[in-house]
Image (cartoon, rainbow, N blue to C red):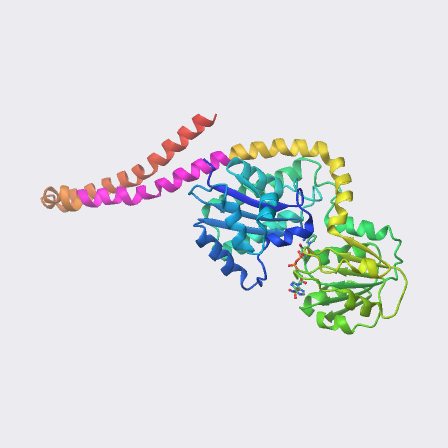
């Protein structure tokens, strides 16, 4: 019944984060993305498509009523990134279909499949990705139905297990690692990027009492919104980064750029002649700080891949909760099947009102036309009212009977 649902995904579970970027669209700007996705949908004859890219996974959720064979992931990712090696696709892409695809989406939404199990950021990312694809008219009724249920299932898990307790996230783990280095509260912090992730970072910096924070971003307004949280906060255009001479103790970079923003040369300039040990945090995927700085300078680099060990300890703490969450998700899968069946019937029965109306018109204008012509005004009006009554009542009967049959079958 659910076999039209497919997920093609590459995740942190079996792929290094540094490789995940290769499974995204190659050299495609934000403005070009909707057109690329539209082309993908057309080329592969997909009915619906949802595209989600986060720091630890890429998901293509598809609905297609035609059969999808084993060669499909190859062709699909060749289109996404023609430079991708065939063996890399074979090795890293996972294809889920039907119940498994639905179950996988539920697990992702409930943060069971996350790098940091229990972090709720993923639900926001899924919702935003869905809204974008809906606005771009890539999704339809099937994905809407599934997303609605995935959100219900995730909320059930967050409220009825202890998975969401002691809220953790990639950001909180990174900050924990940063704090292990005993950075003084007066430390000079440079922050590059002012998106959702760095907003979260800034909340932790405020919480731990840091005050000297300079924020660089393309959109200066967003940099200002972060900078004003700190008594010694400054906002600068990202273009100013290469001319900055204030030095730093900790450099935090997190943007949506798909190439390194801070290379060795820029890092050296930012040091401004200082030689002490520094901390650099790169939460971007793909990386925004060239990792080779670690071999050239005295710097402790904290990046998402390196947080995996801490994330594993977090998973160990939550293992029992994961079991309970999986039981809840199985129940939601059954519920989704029933919703899906009902929706299929509703769609199939959409024609009924028009068809009943057509029968009525034919009866009045063709089959009984002559007899009706001989009736007086009152009698004609009575016949019309009776037919209107019948039309309304008959339209609802098939749907009600089918619904009742479904309830009996599933109880
Ligand atoms: N959300 C999470 O939980 C999470 C966790 C870990 C890592 N990450 C990673 O963090 C990165 C940012 O995610 P986000 O959720 O913060 O994104 P976001 O809210 O969309 O913000 C993106 C930020 O990057 C900037 N930006 C985008 N493209 C750029 C470019 N080519 N050059 C310079 N700046 C650019 C944007 O500047 P404007 O404001 O001018 O547009 C904005 O400041 C991604 O690599 C993501 O995978 C996210």
In the image, the segment drawn in magenta is 336-363
Residue at point 78% right, 57% down? 281
Residue 43 point in image, percent of width and height = 45, 53
Judge whether residue 67 can be spotted in this image.
yes
Residue 394 found in image quarter: top left
Residue 408 point in image, percent of width and height = 43, 26
Q: Is residue 287 left or right of residue 62?
A: right
Q: Which image quarter has ligand 1?
A: bottom right
Residue at point 59% right, 62% down? 27
Residue 149 found in image quarter: top right
Residue at point 45% right, 45% down? 64
Residue 356 point in image, percent of width and height = 27, 41
Residue 390 found in image quarter: top left
Prevalent SS, magenta region: helix
Residue at point 47% right, 27% down? 410
Q: Quadrant of the N terminus?
A: top left
Q: Is residue 242 left or right of residue 29?
A: right
Q: Is residue 178 left or right of residue 5?
A: right
Judge whether residue 228 can be spotted in this image.
no
Residue 177 point in image, percent of width and height = 82, 50
Measured along the vertical axis of the image, is residue 10 above or below residue 31? above
Measured along the vertical axis of the image, is residue 176 above or below residue 217? above
Count of numbered tags: 0
Check if residue 355 falls in the magenta segment.
yes
Q: Nearer the viewer, residue 178 or 8?
A: 8
Check if residue 309 falls in the magenta segment.
no
Q: Nearer the viewer, residue 155 or 371?
A: 155
């Amino acid at each position: 019944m659910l076999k039209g649902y497919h997920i093609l995904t590459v995740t942190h579970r079996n792929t290094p984060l540094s490789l995940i970027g290769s499974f995204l669209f190659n050299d495609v700007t934000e403005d070009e993305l909707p057109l690329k996705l539209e082309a993908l949908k057309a080329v592969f004859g997909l009915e619906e498509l949802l595209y989600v890219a986060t720091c630890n996974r890429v998901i293509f959720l598809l609905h297609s009523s035609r059969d999808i064979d084993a060669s499909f992931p190859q062709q699909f990712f060749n289109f996404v990134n023609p430079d991708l090696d065939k063996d890399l696709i074979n090795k890293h892409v996972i294809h889920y279909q039907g119940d498994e695809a639905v179950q996988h989406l539920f697990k992702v939404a409930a943060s069971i499949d996350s790098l940091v199990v229990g972090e709720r950021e993923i639900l926001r990312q899924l919702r935003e990705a869905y809204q974008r694809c809906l606005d771009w008219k890539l999704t339809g009724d099937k994905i809407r139905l599934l997303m609605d249920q995935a959100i219900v299932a995730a909320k059930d898990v967050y409220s009825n297990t202890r998975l969401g307790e002691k809220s953790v996230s990639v950001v909180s783990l990174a900050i924990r690692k940063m704090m292990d280095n005993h950075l003084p509260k007066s430390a000079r912090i440079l922050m590059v990027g002012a998106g959702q992730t760095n907003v979260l970072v800034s909340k932790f910096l405020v919480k731990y009492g840091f005050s000297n924070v300079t924020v660089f971003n393309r959109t200066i307004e967003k940099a200002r919104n972060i900078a004003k949280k700190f008594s010694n906060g400054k906002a600068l255009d990202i273009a100013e980064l290469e001319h900055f001479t204030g030095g730093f103790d900790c450099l935090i970079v997190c943007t949506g750029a798909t190439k390194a923003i801070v290379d060795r040369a820029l890092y050296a300039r930012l040091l401004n002649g200082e030689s002490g040990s520094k901390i650099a945090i790169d939460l971007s995927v793909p990386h925004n700080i060239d990792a080779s700085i670690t071999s050239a300078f005295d710097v402790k680099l904290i990046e998402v891949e390196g947080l995996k060990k801490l994330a594993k300890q977090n998973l160990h703490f939550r293992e029992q909760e994961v079991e309970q969450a999986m039981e809840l998700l199985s129940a939601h899968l059954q519920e989704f099947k029933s919703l899906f069946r009902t929706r299929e019937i509703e769609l199939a029965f959409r024609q009924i009102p028009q068809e009943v109306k057509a029968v009525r018109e034919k009866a009045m204008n063709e089959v009984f036309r002559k007899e009706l012509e001989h009736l007086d005004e009152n009698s004609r009006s009575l016949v019309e009212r009776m037919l209107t009554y019948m039309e309304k009542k008959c339209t609802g009967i098939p749907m009600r009977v089918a619904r009742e049959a479904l309830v009996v079958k599933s109880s």
